[in-house]
Amino acid sequence: MLKLFRATAILEGISYLLLFGMTMPLKHWADIPEPNKVVGMAHGVLFILYVVVAVVFCWEHKWSIKRFIVLFIASLLPFGTFYADKKYLDPLG
């Protein structure tokens, strides 16, 4: 479950950065909306998967609701899931 959660966190973070850093500028400044549709859909699916996996992971490891809220807020911030991965999910860190 840890590997799945870490992979989901990283992929969700990458899709978030791609969405806001690449495809939204293409959509609004270059009038190219197609990449935004594809990356936006992928990000939406990954975001939902991240939240579901976070709930299951916190439940299985008996983590507090406070820690879940930190993980959830991390998914809303640029680079947040990378921070959460390093701070809470990295078994060596």
Image: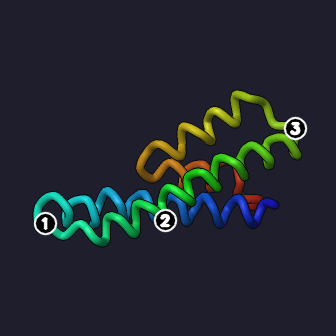
Q: Find residue 71 and report its image quarter.
A: top right
Circle 2 residue: 42
Q: Which residue is at a point 65% across and 66% down the rendered structure image?
A: 7
Percent position (x, y) of residue 19? 35, 60
The residue lying at 88 percent from left, 46 percent from top is 60
Q: What amino acid type should be assigned to the residue bearing mark 1?
A: Asp
In which quarter of the view is residue 8 placed?
bottom right
Disc 2 packing (10 Å; few <14; some 14–19; many ≥20)? some
Does residue 43 appear to the left or right of 7 in the view shown? left
Which structural element holds mark 2?
A: helix
Position of residue 10 relative to residue 74, above or below, is below
Name the side, left or right, on which 73 lies relative to 49: left
Q: Quadrant of residue 66?
A: top right
- The colouring scheme, among rainbow, by chain, secondary structure or one colour, is rainbow
Give the left or right position of residue 66, taking residue 24 as reference.
right
Q: In the picture, which quadrant includes the C terminus?
A: bottom right
Which amino acid type corresponds to the residue marked 2 in the rendered image?
A: Ala
Q: Amino acid at mark 3?
A: Lys
> Which of pointers 3 and 2 lies earlier in the amino acid sequence?
2
* Residue contact between numbered discs 3 and 2, judged by CB atoms under 8 Å: no
Q: Please state the horizontal and vertical placement of residue 25, each as a whole percent of the image.
A: 20, 61
Identify the residue position indicated by label 1 in the image: 31
Gap in angstroms between the C-alphas marked 1 and 3: 47 Å
Secondary structure of the residue carrying numbered label 3: loop
**Label 1: element kind:** loop
**Residue 34, position as x, y percentages in the image:** 28, 71
Label 1 vs 3, first from the N-terminus? 1
* Neighbourhood count class around disc 1 (C-alpha, 10 Å): few under 14, some 14–19, many 20 upward: few
Q: Which residue is mark 3?
A: 62
Tell whether label 3 touches label 1 (CB within 8 Å). Answer: no
Label 3: how many residues lie within 10 Å, few (<14), some (14-19) or many (20+)?
A: few
Q: Is residue 34 left or right of residue 46?
A: left
